[in-house]
Amino acid sequence: MIAGALLAPLLPGRARGPWLIALPLVALAVIWAVPLDAMSSIEFLDYTLTPWQMNSIGRLFATVFAIMAAAGTLYGLHQARPIELVAAQIYAGSAIGVCFSGDLITLFAYWEIMALASTVVIWSNGSERAYRASLRYVVMHLFGGVLLMAGIAGHVTSTGSVAFGPLALDRAAHWLILAGVLLNAGAPPLSAWIPDAYPEASPSGSVFLSAFTTKTAVFVLWVAFAGAPILVWVGLYMIFYGIIYALLENDMRRILAYSIVNQVGFMVAGIGIGTEMALNGAAAHAFAHIIYKALLLMSAGAVLYMTGKRKCTDLGGLFQSMPLTTVCGIVGALAISAFPLTSGFVSKSMISQAAADETLLWVWLLLAAASAGVFLHAGIKFPWFVFFQKDSGLRPPDPPRNMRVAMVLFAVLCIALGVYPAPLYAILPFPVDYIPYTAAHVITQLQLLLFAGLAFFALLPLMRRTNTITLDTDWLYRCLTPAAWHQLERLWLALRRIRDTRIQPWWQESLLRQQLHAMLTSRFSARATIGNFVLLTTLVLLSYLVLYLLF
C-alpha cells in the first residue's frame, strides 16, 4: 500500500482513483492468503528483526484497516485533494504494518511513518486552522514517539531482546512504552489532540483519521499489556471524559471526535480486564467501532460538504432534503449506542459480560451507565440536532454518488454484523462461547437506552447547545504555555540588563560568556557558529558522563 501510494501521483488523473481503491483491496487479499504463524526475519546490526508475522489479532485489525482504507478512498474520491488520498494510503499501510510487526524496531518505524502521514492528511485540507492543528498534532505524536523510543531502548538494554510481545509493568522502560501508546490512544490528559485536529481535516480526512491512530494503539495495548489492572481505570476515565465533553460540544465533528475517546475507553477497559472474553470483546469492538464511527463521520462530512456548516446551532431540518444521509447517520448512531441488531451491541456487550464474569461489580455498573451516556451524546444528540430539531431553512441534497455508496456500504455492514455476528466472532483471537441475543442482554440494554432517551428529551432545554466553545487540556499548551514563555522571555531580558550593569568585568571579557551569549541570542538559529554547537555538545556529554559515573 505504501509503495503503491507513492506511485499514484505518476498515474493519469482518471486512473488514480481506481488505483488507490484497489490498493487496500489487494492488501486485503494478501492478508488472507498468508497462513497464520508465517513470518519473515532479517539481521539488522546485532538484532534479528521480524518485519512481518501473521497472527490472528494482527489479521483482525489489518482486515478492518484495509476495508476502511478502501471505503474511505471511495468516499473522498472527488472532494479530497490527491495528496490527501496518497497520504491516507500511506497512513493505512503503516497501520497495517504495525499489526504485522514482530519486533519493536519495526513497530516503531511504522509508528512514526503513521504519525507523519496522518499529519499530511490534516494539513492537506489547506486551511490555516488545519495547518495550525496539524502542527500541534505532529508535536504531540512526536512526543509520544520519543516516549515509545525511550521505552524500547530501555527494554532492549535490559533484556537484549527486540521481540514484540507481552510486557510486564515491572520497570521504567515498560511504563514509558505504555505512556507513549496511551498518548496515541487518546488517554487524558493528553487526548485533546483528537478534538483539536480531527475536525479540522477535510470531510474525508476526518474519516481516515478516526480509524487508524487510536486503533493501532489499542492493538499494541492488546498485545503488550493485556490484563494490566491500571488499564481498567484508564479506560473508564476515558469513557466518562469523552461523554461529558461530547455533551458540552456544539461542533458536530467535535462531538464525534470526543466520542472516539469515549469508545476507545471501552476497548482499553476490556484489555485491562484481560480475560479471553474481555480481549475478544475489545478486539471485536475495535472492528465494529472503525465501521460505525466512519459512518457517523461520513454523514457529518456529507452535511459539511453540502452546507458548509458544522455547528449544531446552524443546522437542523436536513432530513427533508438529505434523507439518505439522515438514515445512514441514524444507523451509525444506533450502532455506537449498542442498539440490538447493530454491530455495537454484539461487541460492546462482550466487555460488560467479561466484567460480570469476573465479579467486577463497580466496573460493570460504570460500563452500564456509560452505555446510557453514549446514547445521550452520539445516539440522540448528534442526529437530533443535525437532522431534526429546528428547521434551519437549509435544503441541500444528498452528497455525490461516491459518498452515498460509501455510506450505504458501511450502514449495511453495521446492520449485517449486528444481525449475524458469526463471521466477526469467527476471526477473533480466542474461541467465542458467547450468545449476545439472550433475553437478559436485550432487555437490559433496551431499558438503558429507553431511560437515556427519556432523560434526553426531559432535559432538552439543557441539552440544546449555544454558540459557545469548550476548554480542554489543549488550552494548557496552546494558550498558557506560550503566555508563560513570553513572561520567561521578559524575565530573561531583565536579568540580562542586570547582568550587563552589575556583573564583574572579567565575566564580560571571558570566552565562555561570549560563547553562551552567542548561543542564547541566536536561539540556535542558522547564525550560530559551529563552535557554539561544539561547546553545547561538549557540555551535554560532560553532564552525561558525570551522571553516569555518579549513578
Image: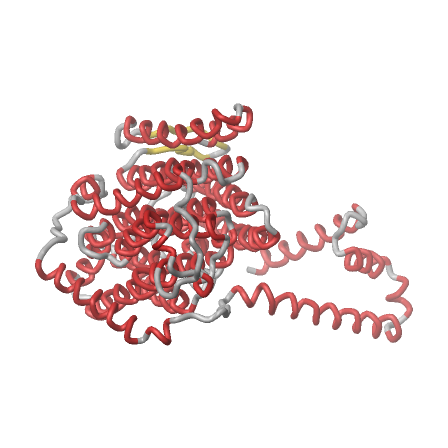
Report x, y in % for residue 252.
43, 59
User: Which of 392 and 197 lies nearest the eye of the viewer?
Assistant: 392
Q: Is residue 342 something one can see in this rendering?
A: yes
Q: Is residue 123 left or right of residue 538?
A: left
Report x, y in % for residue 494.
79, 73
Report x, y in % for residue 53.
34, 33
Q: How is the image coloured?
A: secondary structure
Q: Is residue 443 above or below residue 305?
A: below
Q: Quadrant of residue 25?
A: top left
Q: Is residue 170 something one can see in this rendering?
A: no
Report x, y in % for residue 96.
39, 38
User: Which of 346 and 525 lies nearest the eye of the viewer?
Assistant: 346
Q: Which residue is most to the left? A: 439
Q: Is residue 170 above or below residue 120?
A: below
Residue at 48% x, 28% y: name it. Answer: 16
Quarter of the picture containing the C terminus is bottom right
Residue at 33% x, 27% y: name it. Answer: 30
